Amino acid sequence: MLFASAINLPKQTSLETYLRAYSDATGDAFWTKGTPSVSKWLQYLEQYKKDPSSMKVYGDGIYKDADGGIYFLNEKDLVKNMLERSFQQTHNISASGGTDKVRYRLSAGYLSSDGVLITNKDKYTRMNVSGFMSADLTNWFTQEATFSYAHGKKSEPKSALGAIYSTRLASFYPEGTMPEEIVPEVAGLPFFTSRNQIQWSNPMTEKTDNPRIFLKSILKPLKGLQIAFEYTFDKNIYDYHWYTGSEYYTTVQGDKSVTPAEDYLEKRKRSTNYNAINLYATYDLTIKDIHKMKFMAGFNQESSYMDELEAYSYGQAVIEVPSLGGGTSTLKANDSYDEYAVRGGFLE
């Protein structure tokens, strides 16, 4: 088990430094809702730091004075606010054994990691099993089999705004929702901070599956002659799912926006099948313990086929249960494939 935290995080400057720099560069009128005065803001900030209870603030330290100016007094680290301590656990088990004729190995593993972002939307899990068995069926025939299977699932929050990891917001930017006492028209709407975007966003999910089988037959019908036949099957399956959702939000300018302008469901599926056959033989010949010769011959054939489908369904009728057939607007789909086959042989 492992606990971890994010390191080397960007450090935000103080609100006082930010406001003084803004005043020097632009003037006293600030660009947020109510056109607050920077000089007043600095006075209110000093008062709030000394005695927060002396000012009637709402929500995340938002103050509205008699002139209608809106002042954000609660400083915070917006990057740290979207982070938490992560937790990872790993479990493995294995066994091996056999006799002089039969040998085997078995193993299994499980990994679960909850990332450093708040909520459990950033998560990765992996399960895998593998095994090997070899049996001397006769004194001239040995059969081996290797198999494995791995399943992975990854999720992470994804916002249609594309600004979950934004570091451009100043330390005064409020978390939570807009108080009714400040801007009644957008009361209750969340601000678009990274923390809020993580909380309202739908996580994208990626699933992978990889079954694999390898068979090997070894024959020794004659002295000095060894023949081997190998077969490999490997399949990779990829599945991607993300629904944007539809979320109204606000900013420090008091406006009302929706993200995205039109919601959509995105799905991607990809499958790759790989097959390979190898047949080769070696023959060692010794003549009168003086002359030693070795002959080799072999044949190889392999093929791979990949197909992929990508689809988007816009304007979901039931946002709680999005589906490709549940869109009320455009349905877009693209597909592609890739295929190859190789065959060869050698003799020496």
Image (spheres, rainbow, N blue to C red):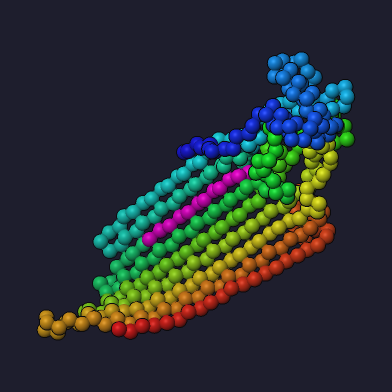
Image position, residue 266 (x, y; %): 71, 58
Q: Quarter of the image for the C terminus: give it.
A: bottom left
Horizontally, residue 316 falls left or right of residue 93, namely right
On the question of residue 198 being in view, the answer is: no
Is 131 or 16 nearer to us in this picture? 16
Image position, residue 248 (x, y; %): 80, 43
Against 188, residue 339 (above or below) is below
Per the image, is 198 magenta?
no
Is 15 or 112 nearer to us in this picture? 15
Image position, residue 288 (x, y; %): 11, 84
Horizontally, residue 145 falls left or right of residue 286, namely right
On the question of residue 39 being in view, the answer is: yes
Horizontally, residue 224 falls left or right of residue 289, namely right
The magenta-colored residue range is: 121-132
Is 173 or 323 nearer to us in this picture? 173
Residue at image location 38% in from the left, 61% down from the top: 132
Against 20, residue 283 (above or below) is below
Is 129 or 200 nearer to us in this picture? 200
Q: How many marks?
A: 0
Quadrant of residue 13 within the rendered picture: top right
Q: Main secondary structure of the magenta part?
A: strand
Image position, residue 43 (x, y; %): 76, 20
Residue at image location 78% in from the left, 53% down from the top: 263
Residue at image location 59% in from the left, 55% down from the top: 207
Quadrant of residue 273 within the rendered picture: bottom right
Quadrant of residue 199 within the rendered picture: top right
Per the image, is 127 magenta?
yes
Residue at image location 75% in from the left, 49% down from the top: 245
